[in-house]
Amino acid sequence: MPNADRADGEVGEVTDERPLGSRAPEFIRRSRPLHLGWRAGVLLIGLAVVVVGVILLPLPGPGWLVIFAGMALWATEFAWAQRILRWTKHKVTEAAQRAMDPRVRRRNLILTAVGVAICAALLSAYVWKYGFVMPWGINR
């Protein structure tokens, strides 16, 4: 739930007020063996998803997204994963708010413009010195 009445005056911070713990259906939580099996299944499926995410990190693919999906699966059942996911959400929200700061945006725009100007100058110098030759034949 959004918490807009913070004592320090910061508005718009989102906090997750749900209690930590299992979110398994009630009929599963009533039976200890069924609940343990449920938790083991969530653990194994989450582990498989996280391992796939780790494998995707050096490859072209959404590695971090898959890792966070595995953490979200674990967070449906384990309090430690819920705490890690809450901390991660908090840090991402802070980073997004910092990125929207006008001074930071202005600095980033200036750095981007300087980088584009440098790349354009280098490309122009290369084309001036070596010419513009396509790697494939156009005049056939």
Image (cartoon, helix red, strand yellow):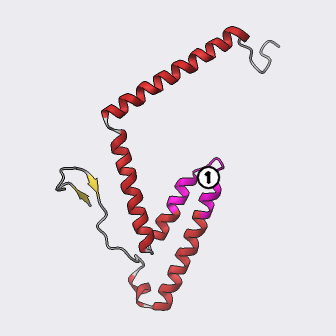
Residue occupying the point 55% across, 19% down: 118
- Amino acid at pointer 1: Leu
Residue occupying the point 46% across, 64% down: 72
- Give SS at disc 1: loop
State the image coordinates of residue 69 (x, y, percent, origin top left).
Answer: 51, 61
Most common secondary structure along the magenta stretch: helix
| Left-right relation of 47 to 131 | left
Residue situated furthest top in the rendering = 128
| 106 part of magenta stretch | no
Residue numbers of the magenta segment? 51-69
Residue occupying the point 51% across, 81% down: 38
Residue occupying the point 58% across, 74% down: 44
State the image coordinates of residue 76 (x, y, percent, origin top left).
Answer: 44, 71
State the image coordinates of residue 47 (x, y, percent, origin top left).
Answer: 58, 69
Where is residue 108, by image quadrant? top left
State the image coordinates of residue 127 (x, y, percent, origin top left).
Answer: 67, 12
| Left-right relation of 113 to 136 | left
| 68 part of magenta stretch | yes
Tag 1 residue: 57
Where is residue 124, by image quadrant? top right
